[in-house]
Image (spheres, helix red, strand yellow):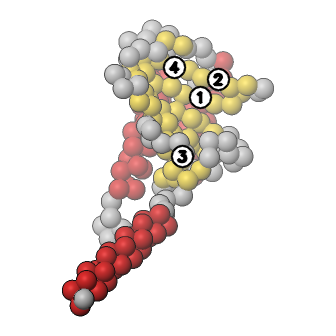
Amino acid sequence: MYLVSYYQSIRVMRLFMSVLFCTILASCSSSKKTQSSDSDQGEVIEFGEGGGFAGTVTTYKLFKSGQLFIKKPRENAFSELQPLDATETEQYFSTVETMQFKSMKCNQPENWYYFLEMDNDGGKTKLVWGSNSNEATQTLKLFCKNLLNVAKKQAALEKKPANQ
């Protein structure tokens, strides 16, 4: 009788621990801020790269405020990265104006492609190109490459432990 009671108490304890573990697991959430893709924060440059065998796409959003967001492949929401400083952000937005982005036309994706998108008066301007695209200007390619490098650098900062 004592042995049966002992095993029953172990079963109850295991059940309790399982329920407790599941409750803790379910209540855990990411401490990273997320942002929906339909934000009212003013002007935004949306850019990224994607394609390949798996068709994965990484999208970044840079707001005029300097806030930077990433949407990784297989994720539904944007996550906030470290913001860019005001001077750097202003340079990107003024470069978009200087290269007359909103009047450009480019739709030549390849297996691996790059894209740059911005709101236009009453619509959006979206440019898509691959490495061998003859529609994309060198200025456009370099601009997007620079944006991607900065965004990837900011994303790498997120992965470092807080004490480093």
The extreme right residue here reads: 122
Label 1 neighbour load within 10 Å: few <14, some 14-19, many 20+: some
The extreme top residue here reads: 134
The residue labelled by disc 1 is 117
Q: Quadrant of the N terminus?
A: bottom left
Label 2 neighbour load within 10 Å: few <14, some 14-19, many 20+: some
Look at 43% across and 11% down and name the residue there.
133
Tell me which numbered mark, 4 or 3, is placed earlier along the sequence.
3
Task: Assess whether mark 4 and mark 2 are in contact (beta carbons under 8 angstroms).
Answer: no
Check the image and report above or below for 118 versus 7. Answer: above
Residue 85 image offset from top left, x and y in percent: 53, 53
The residue labelled by disc 4 is 128
Tell me which numbered mark, 4 or 1, is placed earlier along the sequence.
1
Look at 44% across and 38% down and name the residue there.
74
Residue 16 image offset from top left, x and y in percent: 39, 76
The residue labelled by disc 3 is 78
Residue 69 lies left or right of residue 161; in this view the side is right
Residue 121 lies left or right of residue 147; in this view the side is right
* Circle 2: element type: strand
Check the image and report above or below for 17 versus 35. Answer: below
Estimate the spatial distance between the alpha carbons at disc 3 and disc 2, rounded to whole Å.
Answer: 21 Å
Residue type, label 4: Val
Residue type, label 1: Glu
- Residue 125 badge: 2
Tell me which numbered mark, 3 or 1, is placed earlier along the sequence.
3
Look at 55% across and 53% down and name the residue there.
34
Q: Quadrant of the C terminus?
A: bottom left
